[in-house]
Image (cartoon, grey):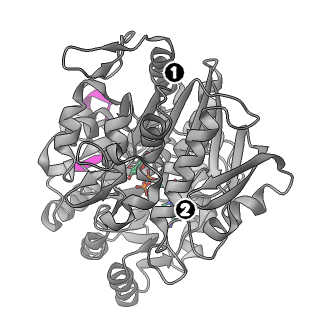
Amino acid sequence: MNVLSIVSEVYPLIKTGGLADVAGALPKALRLHGIDVLTLVPGYPQVLEHLPNRARVGDLDDLLGHRAVVSRAETGGLDVLVLEVPELYQRGGGPYIGPDGRDHPDNWLRFAVLSLAGARIALGHLAPGKADVVHVHDWQTALTPVYLRYAFRSPLPVMCTIHNLAFQGQFSYDIAPWLGLPPAALGFECLEYYGGVGYLKAGLLCSDIVTTVSPTYAREILSPDLGMGLDGVLQQRRSALYGIVNGIDAEIWSPGADPLIPRRYDARSLVRRRENRAALLERFGLPDANGPLFAALTRLTWQKGADLLSEAAEEIVSHGGQLVVCGQGDPDVEAALLDCAGRFPDRVGVHIGYAEELAHLIVSGCDVLMQPSRFEPCGLTQLYAMRYGAIPLVGRTGGLAETIIDANDAAMARGVATGFQFHPVDPHSFREAVRRTCEAFEDREAWTSLQRQAMKADFSWDRSAFQYAQLFEALQAARRVRGEEGELTYAMVDEPNSV
Ligand code: ADP
Ligand code: GLC
């Protein structure tokens, strides 16, 4: 089966977060299930640089007034199509944000063009031929099913995966006439959203299956608390909504084979981690205080609870611990963390920025990896941490709630604990969780068992890829039937994680 995955970032070509990791790893895992994924990404400068030997497969004219060259390349087990529209994608900054830190002002057009090109490629307008199923991710590609249904009248099956409902692609209604969609698509039953347009909203309504990246988050987004205004739409699509937890790419994230860390190790040679710990402290210019070394590796945003880190740092320091932070984001949070490092020069180190190699050093060397997220669709960092024997300390929400077993007395006694959770996500509970973690760290034998248990947790893609494969196969095989309410539905096989 051929799946066309249309996505705004994919590792190792371009990455701002976990979306890229998932888009890069899932195709490799699906191949073992007989599914060939072709991945369409925009030709950002980083992508073009990475793929100097790409081969031109054809041109697409008339993409909302733009013209694209489409090229193809293989990289790291991925089969990639690059959409080259220099005036839209070849510019400074990142995929979504300019060098000035603000959203590119034409993001509505950049991602509408990506979505439209994806629809046309899926329909076979270019050499790779027709796709059997289309997979879109987040708001940036959510218009593909809208183009398929309304502009091309095509029933080609589409799966839309929500990686983060906080980003919805909302724009002024003024852009609606420029999207190349017929009037029927522009009303409230599709694109119109509270007086503006909503790309994700429209995509959720036009896709056959909607998935999100953990079963817990799938349930959470059905309520106003975490539905971010789309809970009503999601309730409407409830029968088509699935939660499939993310996996990790064990080829890239493996302490026994990681070329980016000073000393490789496994669960039986945990003592070797000390060298990585020493290298990590040295990297941040910190002496070894012999207490627990906490770390945070994250976008510094409200979602991630990054504003709570400075206060937690005080608690960590008061228990003899140390903290290193690598991240970027909200300027106020960055400033507060730098200030904190200034106040505790031997105890707190901060690196503002995105640093792939440092990310590997952190998970291989820190004792505790903190994610005080206020909501978390899945989260990958805690999965990497566990695999590297760093103990996660997380807010109990979304994917964090279900991927970690809290080290309460019962779980510790049964030897099943893998980390520490706290709830609610507020400064008081966070401090309390830091205290509990520091106390646990003192019993070194119990701590080592906790590390070994965390390292045993299996978050490889095998199981989750199987669930995606089942849904893709169901989409391909099922005959569309008109349900009683006039909704398009599929006859599903062995439904995984239906909510
Ligand atoms: P999100 O996608 O919401 O940011 P995830 O936990 O799913 O959260 O994925 C984050 C990914 O980005 C992980 O691969 C993590 O290692 C990486 N990451 C986050 N911040 C940084 C950073 N400052 N430097 C390097 N990698 C980072
Ligand atoms: C989003 C979410 C994160 C998830 C990632 C990959 O960025 O915030 O929780 O792990 O997507 O699905």
- The answer to whether residue 308 is magenta is no
Query: Which residue is at 45% across, 43% downward?
Result: 383
Provide residue 480's location: percent of width, then percent of height. Answer: 39, 14
Q: Is residue 130 visible?
A: yes
Is residue 289 depicted above or below 411 in this figure?
Answer: below
Provide residue 60's location: percent of width, then percent of height. Answer: 69, 49
Q: CA distance from mark 2 to mark 1?
A: 39 Å
The one nearer the camera, 141 or 387, is: 141
Mark 1 element type: helix
Q: Which residue is mark 2?
A: 277
Q: Disc 2 or disc 1, which is closer to the eye?
A: 1
Is residue 128 depicted above or below 54 in this figure?
Answer: above
Q: Which residue is mark 1?
A: 469
Provide residue 135's location: percent of width, then percent of height. Answer: 51, 35
Which quadrant would the N terminus be assigned to in this image?
top right
Q: Which residues are magenta?
A: 412-421
Specify whether 279 is left or right of 337. right
Query: Which residue is at 59% across, 74% downward?
Result: 283
Task: Give amino acid for label 2.
Answer: Arg
Task: Give amino acid for label 1.
Answer: Ala
Give the total number of marks visible in the rendering: 2
The one nearer the camera, 50 or 126, is: 126
Provide residue 72's location: percent of width, then percent of height. Answer: 77, 45
Say which mark, if any, is on residue 484.
none
Which quadrant would the C terminus be assigned to in this image?
top left
